[in-house]
Image: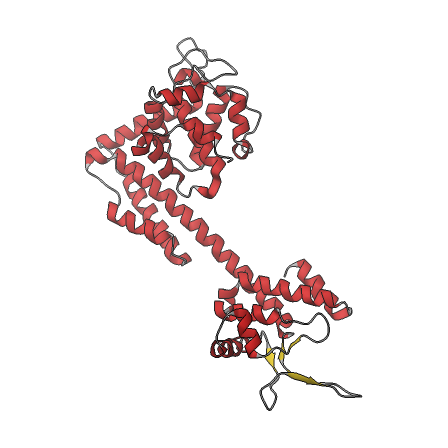
Amino acid sequence: MDVGLRIRRLAMKNTTNQSNVRSAIWTIFNILREGRKEFGVSGPALASLQALLSFLPDSGPLIIYASNKSITARCMKSEASLRRHLVELEAHALIRRQRSSNGKRYRVKHPHGDDMIFGIDISPLLDAADAIEAAAGRAKEKADLIRYHRHEVYALLAEIAENTHVEHQANDTIVDEATIATIRQSLRRETDVKILSGVADKLRAALSTTSKMSGSPVQNERHIQESQKEYLLNEPADDCGKPVRFADVCGQRKIEEDRTQDMPTTGGSTANIAAIERLSVTDIVRACPQAMQFADQPLRSIEELGNFAWKLGTFVPIPEALMRKAAEKHGILAVVLTVLGLVERGEKIRNAAGYFRSVLLGKRAQSFIPAQFLMSAGA
């Protein structure tokens, strides 16, 4: 259980400070909202409970005396609905009702003993705190698993899409487009962990089966592409034994340390060239503080920035073959700026690989300006 919640519950038992009691009640209610489904309470019933708590007195017993008419006016429900919700809340031991003979809620004082109270007792909510906290914990764990498997499936779909593109000439598609479309549509609303995990297992199995194929032209093409990727990332040596710089891989032998105007741009686009020429390494680094958190050391040159962004792209994840193809078409700096812009936007872009393909290799490539994409990431 939450440490703060334990302290508040202890305070309720050992002090007359009524503010602690009210604070704990609302804390427990907020935790119940997070774990409502796991606890088994319906959304409408929870809304009625919130309306009940709004009538909680500032001091004295945790009893609600408000009439059904007053409560329904506050929660915007009919009295019949409220009665059903009260039954549900009582069944889950969140409230306790003390009924009078005429059905009204009131208090009768005794001059020497305990008063006679007819109303809705909220104190059972405190007793249910442990069970509510456990339900919220299960709900969070389930939500985390759903999010994990969802991203896992998206990553596998991106890899399948890339492999399907590479294998197009062999007429060998791993998963047909109709199935992929169905999976993508269901991902947004599917909340069953087992189903999402099962989909990921099947996609992984399909990729594994494909990777075992050998002796085909497609396999040889993949091998060539992998060799090209390693060449780009590892900065191999040239004929004289001198290490090849990052810019050299892109076809450029000279690069200025503080400016990027001599780097390859996106296929001769005037807008892209002008935008890139205005950027320095410092400008790029300042534009992506989130991405820079993953850097092991300060990045002061295009070579360092390029290698960092390329490796970072593989963790997004964007298939290296996809980045290589975009670099060949638009220049490596376009890939660098796009990857950094994607990382900077975080979860705003759910399918990073699909977005990358769309803006650099799809229909949007003609109007896409990587420099503007990065510089507007923090807007």
Residue at image coords 54%, 22%: 282
Residue at image coords 42%, 11%: 253
Residue 176 is left or right of residue 143, and the answer is left
Counting every numbered tag in the picture gives: 0
**Between 48 and 145, which is closer to the camera in this rendering?**
48
Give residue 175's quadrant in the image. Answer: top left
Give residue 227's quadrant in the image. Answer: top left
Residue 337 in the image: x percent, y percent?
44, 28
Give residue 55's quadrant in the image. Answer: bottom right
Residue 77 is left or right of residue 213, and the answer is right
Residue at image coords 46%, 28%: 309
**Between 83 and 8, which is closer to the camera in this rendering?**
83
Is residue 170 in view?
A: yes
For this orientation, the residue located farthest to the top is 240
Residue 144 in the image: x percent, y percent?
49, 53
Above or below residue 236? Residue 184 is: below
**Between 142 and 124, which is closer to the camera in this rendering?**
124
